[in-house]
Amino acid sequence: MTQDDITDEAVSLLQELGLQQYEARCFLALTQLPSGTAKEIHEISEVPRTRVYDAIRVLESQGLVEVQHSSPQQYRAVSIEEATRTLQQKYSRRIETLKTHLEAVEHHDTETADDHVREVWSLSGRDAIDSRMLDLIDKADSEIAFLIVDESLLRDPLFEQLHDAVERDLSIILGGRTEPITTRLGAELPNVRVFETGLDWLIGPAADHEVAISHILLIDRETLLIGSYYPDAEENSAQEHAIYATGLENGVVVLLRRLIASGLVPSKDPAT
């Protein structure tokens, strides 16, 4: 990646965090200088000089730039640590405000005790699927059964949620399709039952380069998340999909519940 590519990417990220393009370019210019005048900022950032002053005023108001009232005025960016902390706090406040507003307008179904909700929804993209997976684990009340085929799922956020579930004293059963997966699970979660699955159809035949199951997550025996991916495809979140099903009497949930129960072969069980 060239320096220009890095600069363009940084500008894009700063815009996603709420800065306008000229503001982002001026801030990046100042990170390359101990301090600078409007002329120097203009020369590095290629922002029109008349617009540099407006951009600097915004950056100053947001705590990202300091001004020395000399002649000519000098400007300098705050430290990278302070800038990222300021942007993170601003972003977090926006997320919290959004959460409050969404909760205020959220639709709530009124269900009677006789209602049996049976739903199936689809999700696309690694980020969306991972977010739902972690949310389901976080909201589990009594039991988690998790079969993992795609080793790339074994990342810190998942282990953090599973450790929290252990601390909540939930019943947890983890299945891995391969020995490396079960070994990693056992090392990270030594007090959790870990199995090696016998469900070879999850990945398909060796010559089959089509879609395969990446994971199956069953929460409290009534909420199911099944992920699918293309094992031989280049890393691309758009290639990943999942279905999300709920309801004790949902046929999909019932079927997978029985397959999970019959398809796990113990390879590690701390209780024995």
Image (spheres, rainbow, N blue to C red):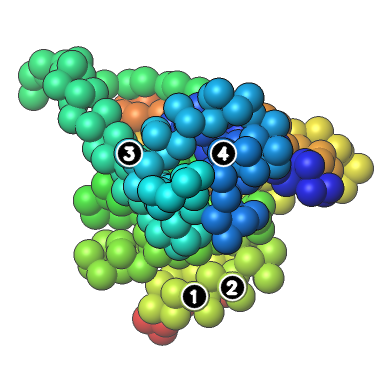
Helix, strand or loop at label 1? It is: helix
Q: Residue at x 39, y 33 (%)?
A: 58
Q: Give coordinates of residue 171: x percent, y percent.
A: 30, 62
Seen in the picture, residue 127 relative to 35 is either above or below; the reply is: above
Mark 2 touching mark 3, by CB under 8 A?
no
Mark pair 2, 1: CA separation: 6 Å
Q: For marks 2 and 3, give the one nearer the viewer.
A: 3
Foreground of the two, 228 or 202: 228
Mark pair 3, 1: CA separation: 46 Å
Mark pair 4, 2: CA separation: 55 Å
Residue bearing the label numbered 1: 188
Mark pair 4, 1: CA separation: 53 Å
For residue 266, say whether it is visible.
Answer: no
Q: Earlier in the sequence, mark 3 or mark 4?
A: 4
Which amino acid type corresponds to the residue marked 3 in the rendered image? Ser
Helix, strand or loop at label 3? It is: helix
Foreground of the two, 194 or 21: 21
Helix, strand or loop at label 2? It is: helix
Q: Residue at x 56, y 45 (%)?
A: 37
Which amino acid type corresponds to the residue marked 1 in the rendered image? Glu
Q: Residue at x 81, y 33 (%)?
A: 210
Mark 2 touching mark 1, by CB under 8 A?
yes
